[in-house]
Amino acid sequence: MHALDNPVWTALTTKQAALAHSSALARRFSPEMTLLGALAANTAMAFDSLAQLIQRDTVTLYFTSQPTLPRGWEVVRAVELHQMVQEESESSLSAHGGEKLNGGTQGGATQDQSAPEVVELTPADVPEMSIVYAATRPGRTLAPKIQKIGMFLGVRDAGKLVAIGGLRLHLAGYREITTVATLPEFEGRGYATAIMRGLIERIRVRGERPFLSVRIDNARAVELYRRLGFRERTKLYSQTIRRAQA
């Protein structure tokens, strides 16, 4: 099995093991950081371990095939995702004529003065980050301590935070880009692309490869990621679940 086939489990048993809440065959992050959790395998015993771990909370699991949940569980939200991995490095993209964004390439190219300014965000920015998140993901809320998993970048327009994106899962050789979002009224200005390029540079400089997951029906985002050298690796079934209420 490839490490990316069960990326949350791999992260929580290796690079991010210190952040794991564990119970035999199940792991999860603190829900204040993210709802993500994982099973060692899709078995009834692993779900029993998960039940002990989450109690009455919800948890989001990724599967590589459509899962059948054991009795006693219910699905709160289910989506299908592309897991995408960047096949080409920043230097390869530039060599192939890729656009220079967010200050050029890793190799120290002349800064593009017209590129949006990308800044590193802090916990003090979480209230504004939450507004961007909620505007692009109706009915969902940003985990208040998501920055404990990885740093976030943002773009401001006239002082207002209008676009965000950050890092989440970390496993040997790979780093995940997550939560890329732009307020709808500010789309089409290159903000998301600039943030993506900034995150990619930070991953590549450490000798790691960027990956991400994106809803299959989000054609605009998929096209953006393809332009930046990402390719679909596999399909993931994301299910947010909880114990069925008695």
Image: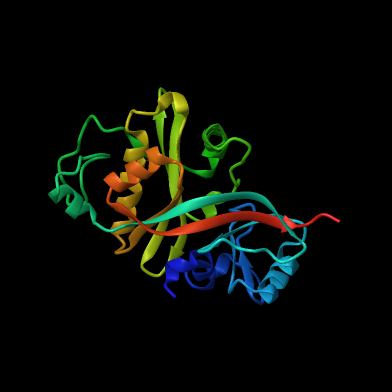
- Asked if residue 207 lies left or right of residue 138, the reply is left
Q: Quadrant of residue 46 in the image?
A: bottom right
Q: Is residue 152 visible?
A: no
Query: In which quadrant will I find the C terminus?
Result: bottom right
> Is residue 190 depicted above or below 34 in this figure?
above
Closest to the observer, 77 or 132 = 77
Question: What is the residue that sits farthest to the right in this orientation?
Answer: 246
Give the tally of numbered discs.
0
> Is residue 80 depicted above or below 47 in this figure?
above
Residue drawn at point x = 49 percent, y = 43 percent: 122
Query: In which quadrant will I find the N terminus?
Result: bottom left
- Asked if residue 49 lies left or right of residue 204, the reply is right
- Asked if residue 226 lies left or right of residue 128, the reply is left
- State the image coordinates of residue 109 (x, y, percent, origin top left): 15, 45
- Colouring: rainbow
Q: Can residue 240 be seen in this view?
A: yes
Residue drawn at point x = 56 percent, y = 68 percent: 18
- Asked if residue 238 lies left or right of residue 51, the reply is left
Residue drawn at point x = 60 percent, y = 71 percent: 42
> Is residue 197 depicted above or below 160 in this figure?
below
Residue drawn at point x = 70 percent, y = 72 percent: 49
Closest to the observer, 29 or 229 = 229
Q: Quadrant of residue 165 in the image?
A: top left
- State the image coordinates of residue 153 (x, y, percent, origin top left): 41, 43
- State the image coordinates of residue 20 (x, y, percent, origin top left): 60, 67
